[in-house]
Image (spheres, coloured by chain):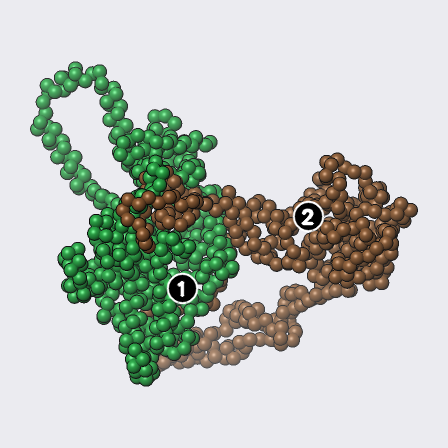
Chain colours: A green, B brown
């Protein structure tokens, strides 16, 4: 080791991209070019064009407040977040992120002027290449977000909100946005929609149906049916009609904001637009929520590979590498469950560990790996394998597919079951032969948004009566909604719907209604 | 790749959002401020304030699962000793093991939201619906203070005041109206003449040349910038209202005033001082303490040294008048005074007090506030004890003088309400 260090500092002196902690634009450019070379040629990354913006810590706080987006409409809640972050920062409870990266094309990375040159190197490798590659290639982002259009859309949203405030009054706009924000988690399409039928296909279908009816027409059924069913006709017809109306309304519908935007009877056009803006922003963030662990893992893995290669090539000094590794290790620390710092599984730690493990399996598999991952063990192409994983999985499926016994052992994972009916929690599986699959399944499930965000649908609208909107919450394992929150959200919902709201919590297994929340109509 | 330096961009992009937030939580924030004021050290009155407000009204509700109930499973790192089938007691209040997947604020939803108010925000909210009565003297000596103010433009002045924009505007207008050919016009005409020459159109070329010469002559005749175009910024001396005030703090420091009472008085003086500094450019502070005789002292002595002796309030009023005569001509100064006392006075002194106050001090003062501190007994029994000597004396003066107010304060928490009460905007109608 001393030998190499000496060599590095002797031979590398003129090769070094930068010396000392100060950064300037020239150095940034040189480092960027070197990183780009490694990222594209050696790791095979595929990225949007990059735009790197240097900002101050004040501006970083500003960016925090508008949920990381460079433009945002005005709303008091962003001010609240700002006040909170500022208080935490000023009192030293919390440092600022080194960077913020935006899923747009060009991909914008904010780096802070306070960072040292070594940190800037880390940040460029992490954000401008790691995150950027993930944004461009992961199927969820490709399917749901429009990277080229987001900045334009945000500009539109900001201007529209400002315009609405001027025209219709800031109070009304604020109330509408409050309500829309409360429903943002219920404002996403979770599955790609059936493609819209086009007119030709629709017509053809209609003709087919008519021809079939003509060919199989039998007069006798008509009269017979009349006799047999005369008793139940009224009821059935009414039911059929209702079903038809429901279908027309698109019920059941899980995207509450979408439903309100399209169907709420008393919303003004500008309110619909505001609801739509909230819905679009929520949808934009939906892939991020589902891929947080992978996204961070991917970026962390990339910066780790890249800075090590920079060092091997003598492009950065030992000191710079040590500084980078210091912050790298603090990012990927996983405190254990009985540690004071423990607050769930660290997405950076798990993502990074799994991806390094995939690399190991590809290059140097053990017998166990060959048994668990026959298709990739020893295939000699770690980056290709990882690129495939980054492109085609989300957190849940990634864990289900790639979490290896080795990583479970390293993390010493165990699964516990907490049944409110029992008097204590029970350890259900630990990191051993019998438990690996169960732990993997349970961990994957905990990353499934559809499971840990409550499953809520609009089931029905009482069209005949008081237009009460009926929602249902599919309850799994007896986990009900938080009551105060639920009530507050329903109040907000009813301010958009203008009629009463009923939310039934229905046990998914038995269809039994466990609890009902109701908000009466407002006038 | 693009590197952009955004540092020069304006910061404080979230300022508007922050103001909206404070506006929304105003009620809670004001309560919190009044609350914070009670605990505050006096020296900190000018700084910002960390306030903590209840989250009600600023919650952002979302539909989410309850923190408890039902059957849950967690995957947790760091197993050291557990084997399958082990039973673990539920951790108290969600800390420690096993709560991994639950979001951190599931239980313990924060009941208080803490953030920093800047000094400006703090004072704005503190004095929001207060105003100073009789803000400035009605009679002002106009010659005393003047200020240079922009007053349009003039045709002469010093080069330093040269207004290039206005000058160029005049020049442009003149050039257009006099039809002075611009350089590009001249070039175009020259090209035209050349083209005509090349096309062997002798007549056209001659005409074009002639036109060109005329235009050139015209351009020479009318200057690009003529002396009539030139404008200078003009300034005028405008008499400014006198924005200086003097604040007299009068306090009884005789043995009957305890530390707690002095502290109450101090808090009141402090609020008044902060309030005055917001309205006046300069505020002089004069401290006058009295026992059976009065003297002007510095702040430290005023609040901290102890004196013994009887109590003759009129001495303090005399001293105040003396200082006013010597240094603060009522013509030029806005005079405010606040007097704090426990209400003790020699009964023989009462007449003189009311004479001095009603006859001499109030006519020259903008405002005179009297607070009687430490009437604890009053509150303890729930019904008023008989009014003190001084209170009775002042009560006779109060009705004829709108710029005189008196209140009782027994507890630090009452200071701000009393202060608020004294300076509330709709005081007159209350």
Where in the figure is residue A221, as x and y percent of width and height?
Answer: 12, 20
At 26% across and 27% down in the image, what residue appears?
A: A241
- Quadrant that contains the N terminus of chain A: bottom left
Query: Is residue A249 visible to us here?
Result: no
The dot on residue A98 is 1
- Left of A391 or right of it: where is B373? right
Of B399 and A352, the residue lying toward us: A352
Q: Position of residue A397 (x, y in %)?
A: 24, 51
Comparing B287 with A447, the one in front is: A447
Query: Which residue is tagged 2?
Result: B412
Residue A48, position as x, y percentages in the image: 29, 63
Which callout, 1 or 2, points to the residue nearer the camera? 2
Q: Label 2 lies in what chain?
A: B
Are discs 1 and 2 located on one and the same chain? no
Disc 2 is placed on an element classified as: helix
Disc 1: host chain: A
């Amino acid at each position: 080791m001393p030998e190499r260090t000496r060599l590095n500092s002797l031979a590398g002196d003129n090769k070094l991209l930068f010396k000392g902690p100060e950064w300037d634009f020239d150095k940034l450019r040189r480092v960027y070019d070197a990183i780009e070379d490694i990222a594209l040629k050696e790791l095979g990354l595929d990225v949007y064009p990059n735009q790197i913006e240097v900002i101050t810590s004040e501006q970083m706080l500003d960016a925090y407040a508008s949920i990381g987006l460079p433009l945002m409409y005005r709303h008091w809640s962003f001010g609240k977040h700002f006040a909170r972050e500022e208080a935490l920062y000023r009192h030293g409870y919390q440092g600022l992120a080194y960077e913020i990266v935006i899923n747009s094309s060009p991909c914008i990375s904010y780096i802070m002027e306070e960072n040292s040159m070594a940190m800037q190197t880390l940040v460029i490798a992490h954000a401008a290449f790691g995150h950027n590659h993930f944004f461009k290639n992961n199927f969820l982002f490709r399917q749901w977000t429009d990277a080229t259009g987001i900045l334009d859309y945000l500009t539109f949203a900001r201007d529209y909100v400002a315009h609405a405030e001027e025209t219709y009054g800031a109070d009304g706009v604020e109330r509408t946005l409050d309500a829309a924000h409360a429903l943002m988690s219920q404002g996403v399409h979770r599955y790609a929609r059936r493609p819209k039928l086009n007119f030709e296909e629709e017509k053809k279908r209609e003709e087919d149906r008519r021809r079939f009816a003509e060919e199989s027409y039998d007069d006798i059924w008509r009269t017979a049916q009349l006799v047999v069913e005369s008793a139940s006709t009224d009821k059935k017809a009414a039911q059929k009609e209702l079903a038809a109306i429901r279908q027309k309304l698109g019920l059941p519908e899980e995207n509450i904001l979408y439903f309100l935007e399209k169907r709420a009877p008393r919303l003004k056009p500008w309110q619909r637009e505001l609801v739509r803006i909230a819905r679009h922003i929520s949808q934009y963030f939906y892939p991020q929520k589902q891929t947080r662990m992978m996204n961070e893992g991917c970026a962390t893995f990339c910066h780790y590979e890249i800075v090590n290669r920079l060092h091997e090539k003598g492009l950065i000094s030992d000191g710079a590498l040590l500084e980078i590794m210091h912050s790298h290790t603090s990012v990927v620390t996983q405190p254990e469950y009985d540690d004071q710092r423990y607050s769930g599984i660290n997405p950076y730690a798990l993502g990074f560990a799994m991806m390094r493990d995939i690399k190991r399996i590809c290059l140097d598999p053990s017998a166990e790996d060959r048994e668990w991952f026959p298709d990739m063990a020893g295939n000699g192409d770690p980056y290709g394998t990882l690129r495939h994983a980054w492109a085609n999985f989300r957190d849940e499926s990634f864990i289900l597919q790639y979490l290896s016994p080795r990583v479970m052992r390293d993390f010493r994972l165990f699964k516990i079951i907490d049944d409110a009916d029992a008097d204590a929690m029970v350890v259900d599986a630990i990191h051993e032969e019998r438990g690996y699959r169960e732990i993997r399944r349970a961990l994957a499930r905990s990353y499934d948004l559809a499971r840990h965000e409550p499953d809520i649908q609009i089931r029905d609208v009482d069209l005949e009566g008081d237009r009460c909107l009926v929602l249902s919450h599919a309850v799994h394992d007896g986990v009900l909604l938080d009551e105060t929150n639920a009530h507050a959200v329903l109040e907000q919902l009813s301010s958009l719907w203008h009629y009463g709201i009923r939310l039934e919590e229905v046990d998914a297994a038995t269809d039994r209604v466990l609890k009902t929340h109701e908000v009466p109509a407002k006038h | 790749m693009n590197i952009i330096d955004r540092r020069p961009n304006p910061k404080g992009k979230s300022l508007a959002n922050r103001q909206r937030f404070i506006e929304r939580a105003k009620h809670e924030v004001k309560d919190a401020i009044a609350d914070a004021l009670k605990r505050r050290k006096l020296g900190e009155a000018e700084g910002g304030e960390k306030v903590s407000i209840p989250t009600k009204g600023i919650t952002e509700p979302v539909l989410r699962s309850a923190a408890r109930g039902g059957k849950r499973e967690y995957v947790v790192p760091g197993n050291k000793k557990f084997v399958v089938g082990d039973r673990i007691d539920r951790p108290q209040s969600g800390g420690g093991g096993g709560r991994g997947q639950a979001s951190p604020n599931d239980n313990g939803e924060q009941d208080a939201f803490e953030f920093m108010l800047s000094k400006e925000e703090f004072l704005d909210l503190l004095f929001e619906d207060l105003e100073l009565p009789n803000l400035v003297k009605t009679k002002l000596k106009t010659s005393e203070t003047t200020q240079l103010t922009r007053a349009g433009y003039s045709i002469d002045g010093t080069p330093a005041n040269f207004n290039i924009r206005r000058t160029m505007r005049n020049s442009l207008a003149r050039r257009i109206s006099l039809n002075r050919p611009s350089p590009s016009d001249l070039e175009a005409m020259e090209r035209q003449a050349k083209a005509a020459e090349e096309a062997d159109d002798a007549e056209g070329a001659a005409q074009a040349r002639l036109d060109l010469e005329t235009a050139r002559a015209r351009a020479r005749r009318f200057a690009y910038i003529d002396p009539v175009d030139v404008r200078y910024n003009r300034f005028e001396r405008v008499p400014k209202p006198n924005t200086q005030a003097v604040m007299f703090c009068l306090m009884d420091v005789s043995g009957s005033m305890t530390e707690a009472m002095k502290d109450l008085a101090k808090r009141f003086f402090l609020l008044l001082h902060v309030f005055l500094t917001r309205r006046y450019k300069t505020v002089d502070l004069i401290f006058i303490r009295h026992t059976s005789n009065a003297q002007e002292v510095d702040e430290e002595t005023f609040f901290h040294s102890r004196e013994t002796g009887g109590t003759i309030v009129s001495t303090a009023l005399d001293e105040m008048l003396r200082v006013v005569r010597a240094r603060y001509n009522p013509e030029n100064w806005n005079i405010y005074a606040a007097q704090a006392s426990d209400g003790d006075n020699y009964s023989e002194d009462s007449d003189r007090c009311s004479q001095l106050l009603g006859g001499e001090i109030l006519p020259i003062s903008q405002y005179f506030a009297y607070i009687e501190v430490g009437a604890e007994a009053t509150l303890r029994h729930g019904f008023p004890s008989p009014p003190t000597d001084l209170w009775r004396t002042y009560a006779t003066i109060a009705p004829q003088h709108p710029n005189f107010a008196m209140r009782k304060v027994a507890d630090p928490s009452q200071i701000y309400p009393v202060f608020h009460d004294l300076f509330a905007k709709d005081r007159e109608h209350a």
